[in-house]
Structure formats: structure tokens, C-alpha cells
Amino acid sequence: MTNTSQDRILEVKTLWHYYGNTPALRGIDLEARRGEFVTLLGPSGSGKSTLLRILAGLELPTDVNVMTLDGQDVSNIPANRRNVSTVFQHYGLFPHLNVRENVEYGLRARKVPAADRRERALKMLEQVQLSDFAERPIARLSGGQKQRVAIARSLVLEPVILLLDEPLGALDEKLRIDMQVELLELQRRLEMTFIYVTHSQEEALTMSDRILLMNDGDIVQTGTPEDMFDRPNSRFSASFMGVENLFDAKVVAVSDAGLTVEVNGASIEGVWTGASLPSVGETICCGFRSERVQIADDSTTSMNSLEGKLTSHIYKGKYLDLTYQTALGPIRMRSWQSHAAPTETARIAWHKDQTILCPKS
Amino acid sequence: MFRPPTHVAPASYMSFVLIWGLVALLPTAGLLLWSTLTMENFQIVWEPSLQAYRDVLSSGRWQVTIRTLEIAAIVTLIEILLAVPFALWLAKGTKSAGVRTVSLALLTIPFFLSLSSRTIVWRGVLGLNGPINAALLQLGIIQEPLDWLLFSQFSVILGLIGPYFPTMVFPLYLAFMLIDDEVLAASKDLGASPAFTFWNVIVPLGLPGLGAGIVFTFVPMIGDPVVPELLGGGNVVVLSASVQSLLRILNYTVASALSVLMLVILVAMISLVAAITARFAKGGL
């Protein structure tokens, strides 16, 4: 998809937001294309929900240079006059109205005639497979059904962007995975822009076209799920994206092919994921995923390898989590042969191009 | 842990029903019985009769009942108009727990003083030589002191507003507190103006509180003898005074009949409020 101005449905430049004197958002730049699934990922307190509330218009930003929605300036437009709609974490359904009346609510606020809004509400309920529940009170719905009512209630207004604030957080594990697929199919079918807030990296990786990783009121990394998973560009990103083995490293040599670093006396080679290359002697961060670590079968030069001594193993059903004590320190390894007895000492190895080297902050 | 009444041993709830019957229902039944008897020479005549009810309607006591209901209704309406914005602000407007606690405390502190001593203050304020008349005279707005400020229906209504404000605020406050913030945010997000949200979300969800507030405000006000006596000065006779005067002349049967009529009116009104609350809370406006 090309990034022409027509494609760009949302654009935000240097957005600052304060609670009292505390900055909650620090100069955020953000854009979304038509039909894109964008995820705001981050730990609690990172500002992702605040950002979403500002995009919804439920809060007006303290200061922003540009905030346009579908080409129109919305920096001072409150939520009730902004053409976006939010699916809330606990759905925010009206408990005194039934399913159909909930879906009709926004149309009623827009003074759509009764017959017309009824028809549109029922059509939307059909889309989310809730036709049989139209007259049912909200209290008698399951979690997943409430979720779908909330989505229908937003979509019936035909917003240009649908905002979703951790909408799967209140559901149980099994339902959450089903709903991920359902949401994704809905988004593809409607070709609508979704902006999705979550703290779950797994949810973000499954659903997104693009992930914006937030920390402490700022967007620290942007990329496709593959980028975020394989090439985190800071220690925070790596740790948040679930890189289990993280060490401080000192740069020994810099070349076009890669970097050589020294971690606790051991020499490691890897790929630089940061912006500008570091200089020799600088302290950086070295990380690799436990599922990329394996028992060395032969000495290939494309791998880093170390002698290790098994210190713990935990059975997790589908896999085994092993910890080897090495010259580097303890290294976590995920073994998919969960029923094989691990050996006490082994030479463990992992690919150099799967070794992430990034700035410490 | 809460157990539904059906899971409680019959002995425990039957004893409750028994005690309730003795302390509350038995006197009421007695009242009903007495109202259907007559009195001769201060003696009860054990013979069924509707004479007491005829006496209530033929004497001026019926007008007293109507006036009492009218005053209570006006004050209740004023309380609703004052308490709804206040309770809404307290429950949803202020984010500070401190402000909330202080406001709630300020609502209860006046109850430390007796109702009489709180009410008597109005006499000085509203009297012919009081500060209000003095200020109006000084400003040249009036030439003569206003005599309807005190010992009038006006002063009784004014005096009742204060004591019965908290009884309206508290149930409303609790009902508004129970409205999820996300529901209000969703209403705004779906394009509703503040007025639309008020009438379509806050009012229907606050109705149980409003119903309770009306019952707790209106009903005790009907029986309140203090404020009308102190601020009505004999010009505003209300039901409680009427019943008291009947008891003073030992006319028990008419006093009972008046009380029974009042009870019927109140039960009818409470049922009406409950029915409206249930209907609106379910269906929206």
C-alpha cells in the first residue's frame, strides 16, 4: 500500500498531554492508513489508553501540532462530534436497554427516525451474529456476546476509525483466542481502520498490520509484527517482546557483517538493531530468544556456542524450559522435545543472525 | 455471606415475621379497628360504624390533609431539583475523595443539633425585624416589612428544605455512584450531548435512588410536627398537629380514621413511585 495523503486517515504530530505537571504523553507522532490494523502495545501506565481516549475525543490534548481525522482538523472536537467510535474494556453497555436499543443508541442521539434506526441496528446485529438476541436484556448475555454488542453499537455509526481499548481483557483464555480471529475477520471484511490497545504482545503479534510499542508516554518502536518480534531496537523493547536472555555487552569490533561483543568474557556475534552503529568499547545490550537456543550438533561458524551446565528444568506440557549456567550467565532454553531427558552438561548454541544487539535504552 | 431468604431456616425468618407483626403490624391493625368504632362520652362503643370517617370528611380536617400533602409535595419537588445536580456532582463531577468526604460529612453534621433548635433560627431571620426585611427596607425595594415571610406556608416550606435535603441526596448519590464511568464515556463517544446522556442514561439508571429519595423525604415530612409548629405559628395547621389535637380531646376514633386515610394515601403513592421506577428503569425514557 502506498502512503499517499488520501490513504492516511489519521495523522497526529507532536502530541503532549499532562495530568497536572506530570506528562502522560511526550510528543507522540502517529498515523494510520485506511484499512490498517494498528496496535498500541505497552505496559500499564505507558500512556496507551490515554492516547486512545484522546483519539476518541474523550479527553482533549494539552498540546498538539497536527491532529487530523480523514483530512479534517479534530484537535478541539469532543467525542460526541467526532466520527470515531470506541469499544471499551468493560464494553460500557447501557444496562437498562436491551441489545437492539443499545445498538440504536448512537443513531437515536443523531435523531435518526425510529424505523430507519431499527432497520440499521438489526442489520448490524446480523453482521455480528446476534440477530436472535435483539430483544434480550444486557444482563443475560455472555462476555463474548456483550463484546459483539459493543462492536455492533460502534460500527452501526459507520465511524472512519474503530478504537478498541483492551477489548479482550475481560474474557477467558479460550474465548479470547476465538475473538481475536473474529475481530480480525471483521476488520478485513469491513476494510476499516482499527486502532487497538493491548498489553499482550501475543495479541498484538497475531492481529496487527503495525505495532506501536509505547513506554513512559512515548512510542519507542514502530514496526510490523515480524520487525517487533525479531528486531527489537532497545532493551525495553526486547524485554517487552519476550526476549528471555538479555545481557549487558561491551562492543569489541564493528563490521558490515555484524558486531562482535564481549559478555562476561565470552565473545558473541550478532546483528545490530539500533539506529546508528555503536563505537568500540560502548556498553550495549545483547539478547536472544530461548526458543532459538539449541543443543549444538556440530560446530558451525554461523552460531554462537557455549558450554553449559543444567541448573533447572520446568515441564510446561508442550515444551520444557531449561536453564543452563554458562560463562555468560544463566541462559534459558526452550526444548520442544518435552519428554526427552535433558543432559547435565551440554554445548548450547544459537544463530548469530538471531542474536540481537541493541542500545541499552 | 448473603443467603437468599429461601435458604434460611424457617424458624429464623418466622421469628422475624412474628416480631415484625407484633411491633409494626399489630398497632396498625389496632388503628384500623379503632377507626371503625365510635365514641360516646369519651367511651369506646364496640359497634362497627363509619362515623369517624364521616367526621374526618365533614370537619376541616380533610383540608388539613390536602394542605399537608401539598406542602410535602412542593418541598419534595424542590428537594429533587436541588439534590439531583448536587448528588450528580458529588458522585461523578468531583474526582477528589477529600471533597466528597467533606461534603457528605457536612450533610450529616446538622443532625447533631435537634430539629427544633435548627428551625427556631429561621424566626429571627424571617421575622418583621429580621435581617431580610431590614435589608429590603434599606435598599428601598419595599416600604413596609413583609409579613408573609414568617408564620406562613412560605416559611414552613423554606424551613422544611434544609432538614429533608440529605434524605434526598443520599439515595441519589448512591444510585449515581453505581453508574459505571465507562457507560457515561460510551454515551459521549456514541455522539450523545450532555443533555441526551442525562435524560437517557443518568435519569433511568438513577431512578431507584430517586424513588427511595422521594419515599424517605415525602413520608417523614407528612408526619413532621416541628417545623410547621415553629414556623407556621398556628397559621399553617398540618396533619400531625391535627392528629395531636384530636388525641388531646381524647377523640381516638377520628384520630385513627385520619391516620388510616393517610396510610392509604401513602401506600398508594409509594406503590405508584415503585411502579414508575420499575417501568422506566427497564424501558428507558
Image (cartoon, coloured by chain):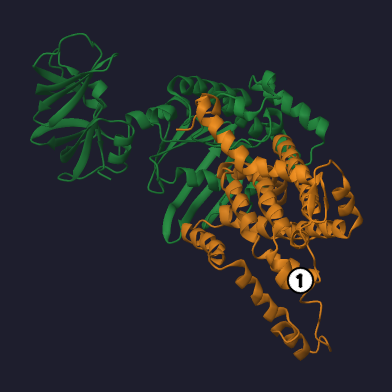
Chain colours: A green, B orange
Q: Residue furthest top?
A: A340
B126 to B242, vertically: above or below: below
Is residue B251 something one can see in this rendering?
A: yes
Is residue A6 something one can see in this rendering?
A: no
Viewer-proximal residue among B257 and A97:
B257
Split into 4 quadrants, where in the image is the C terminus of chain A? Answer: top left
Which residue: 47% across, 24% down?
Answer: A176
Could you tell whether A121 is left or right of A202 in the image?
Answer: right
Image coordinates of residue A46 in percent, x first then y, are: 40, 45
A276 to B76, vertically: above or below: above
Viewer-proximal residue among B221 and A157:
B221
Q: Residue furthest right?
A: B58
Say which amino acid is labelled 1: Gly
Image coordinates of residue B218 in percent, x first then y, are: 71, 54
Q: Could you say which quadrant of the image residue B23 lies in?
A: top right
Which residue: 70% across, 63% down?
Answer: B225
Split into 4 quadrants, where in the image is the N terminus of chain A? Answer: top right
Image coordinates of residue B205 in percent, x first then y, are: 65, 42
Image coordinates of residue A50 in percent, x first then y, are: 49, 47
Could you tell whether A42 is left or right of B239 in the image?
Answer: left
Q: List the residue tagged with mark 1.
A: B232
Using a 10 Å C-alpha cutoff, classify the residue at mark 1 as few (fewer than 14 neighbours), some (14 to 19) or many (20 or more): many
